[in-house]
């Protein structure tokens, strides 16, 4: 059997590389301009390699009873790690994946295609434009994992964007987002303040060292109108191979402090990661 070989291709927003994992037979790492974007194991789609995807997976596991099919909207495609996870853990789910990079979509469709009948549909579009035009009350879960390079684009950080996301979700729906920041957390605090203007329930999942300001890192935002099962989420994240902490209620309010919600006029991208934070090699 031939050994898998790396694939390098120019895509719309940089140079994408698919690199095989020597330790897992059909597993691949996707990078764009050297920044890790996704890791997928085609034989074991429930394997989540990156810390933040594991935390998103824990959140997905707790939004509804195990195995229940959901309508999920993904903003940002990558190599479709989480859509594959949902298809495996919640068979029968209907999933739409919105990705702005046409070249990246083509690369994944060619090299790492999703199985037929998976319920996953791919769409080339801008994330905000898509949700502003989408049917209201059409998704149980919205997952935002959109990075231009290593930064969340500014137009996906404002109260207008948060309102558009809320409009797409059903009344008991849940919004999940992958964000990144470091102390003093100006961006992360502003995002929690922004989504607090739209959703009553807010939780934050992050590695304790990140929350203590020791390093730059990812944080997962969870937002909804209904009470979140933060106890179950905290148990799962604390028991993970990469333990994390769940902040909610007074802990989130204390973290937000005096941070103000962000409007379209003053929206900025998430901060540039320090050199080497997310790079490979």
Image: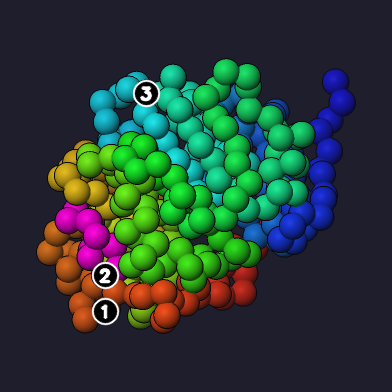
Q: In the rendered structure, which disc, 2 or 1, sits on the residue that comes first in sequence?
A: 2
Q: Which residue is mark 3?
A: 69
Q: Answer few, some or many: residues within 10 Å of disc 1's Cα (few below 14, many 20 plus, some between 14 and 19).
A: some
Q: Position of residue 77 (x, y in %)?
A: 58, 45
Closer to us: 3 or 132: 132
Q: Tell me the quarter of the picture where residue 261 sits.
A: bottom left
Residue plotted at (21% across, 81% down): 258
Task: Using the rendered view, name the quadrant where residue 109 is placed.
Answer: top right
Q: Which mark is residue 136?
A: none
Mark 3–mark 1 distance (CA, rounded to whole Å): 37 Å
Q: Secondary structure at mark 2?
A: helix
Q: CA distance from mark 3 to mark 2?
A: 31 Å
Callout 1 secondary element: loop
Q: Are marks 3 and 1 in contact (CB under 8 Å)?
A: no
Q: Are marks 2 and 1 in contact (CB under 8 Å)?
A: yes
Which is more N-terminal, label 2 or label 3?
A: 3
Residue 116's place in the image compared with 4, above or below, is above
Residue at screen point 19% across, 54% down = 201
Give the extent of the magenta segment: 193-202
Does residue 164 sit above or below 231 in this rendering? below
Q: Residues within 10 Å of mark 3 (few under 14, many from 20)?
A: some
Counting other residues with Cα less than 10 Å from the Cα at mark 2, is it few (<14), some (14-19), or many (20 or more)?
many
How far across and how far down the image is residue 180, in percent? 45, 65
User: Which quadrant does the C terminus fall into?
Assistant: bottom right
Which mark, by number, is residue 259? 1
Separation of marks 2 and 1 at Cα, in angstroms: 6 Å
Quarter of the image for the N terminus: give it: top right
Q: Is residue 11 shown in magenta?
A: no
Dot 2 corresponds to which residue?
193
* Local secondary structure at mark 3: loop
Quadrant of residue 254 in the image? Answer: bottom left
Q: Where is 156 relative to 123, above or below?
A: below
């Amino acid at each position: 059997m031939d050994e898998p070989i790396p694939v390098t291709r120019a895509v719309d927003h940089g140079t994408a590389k698919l690199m095989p994992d020597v330790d897992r037979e059909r597993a691949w790492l996707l990078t764009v301009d050297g920044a890790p974007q996704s890791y997928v194991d085609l034989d074991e789609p429930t394997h989540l390699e990156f810390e933040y995807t594991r935390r998103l997976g824990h959140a997905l596991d707790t939004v509804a009873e195990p195995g229940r099919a959901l309508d999920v909207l993904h903003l940002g495609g990558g190599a479709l790690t989480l859509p594959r996870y949902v298809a495996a853990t919640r068979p029968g789910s209907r999933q739409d994946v919105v990705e702005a990079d046409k070249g990246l979509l083509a690369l994944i469709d060619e090299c790492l295609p999703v199985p037929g009948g998976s319920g996953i549909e791919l769409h080339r579009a801008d994330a905000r434009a898509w949700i502003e035009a989408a049917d209201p009350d059409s998704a149980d879960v919205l997952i935002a994992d959109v990075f231009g390079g290593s930064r969340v684009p500014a137009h996906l950080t404002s109260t207008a964007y948060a309102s558009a996301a809320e409009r797409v979700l059903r009344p008991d729906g849940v919004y999940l987002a992958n964000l990144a920041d470091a102390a003093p957390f100006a961006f992360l605090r502003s995002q929690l303040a922004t989504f607090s203007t739209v959703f009553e329930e807010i939780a934050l999942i992050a590695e304790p060292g990140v929350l203590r300001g020791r390093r730059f890192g990812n944080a997962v935002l969870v937002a909804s109108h209904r009470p979140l099962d933060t106890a179950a989420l905290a148990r799962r994240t604390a028991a993970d191979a990469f333990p994390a902490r769940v902040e909610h209620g007074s802990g989130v309010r204390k973290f937000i402090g005096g941070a103000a919600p962000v409007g379209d006029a003053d929206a900025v991208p998430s901060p540039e990661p320090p050199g080497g934070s997310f790079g490979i090699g």
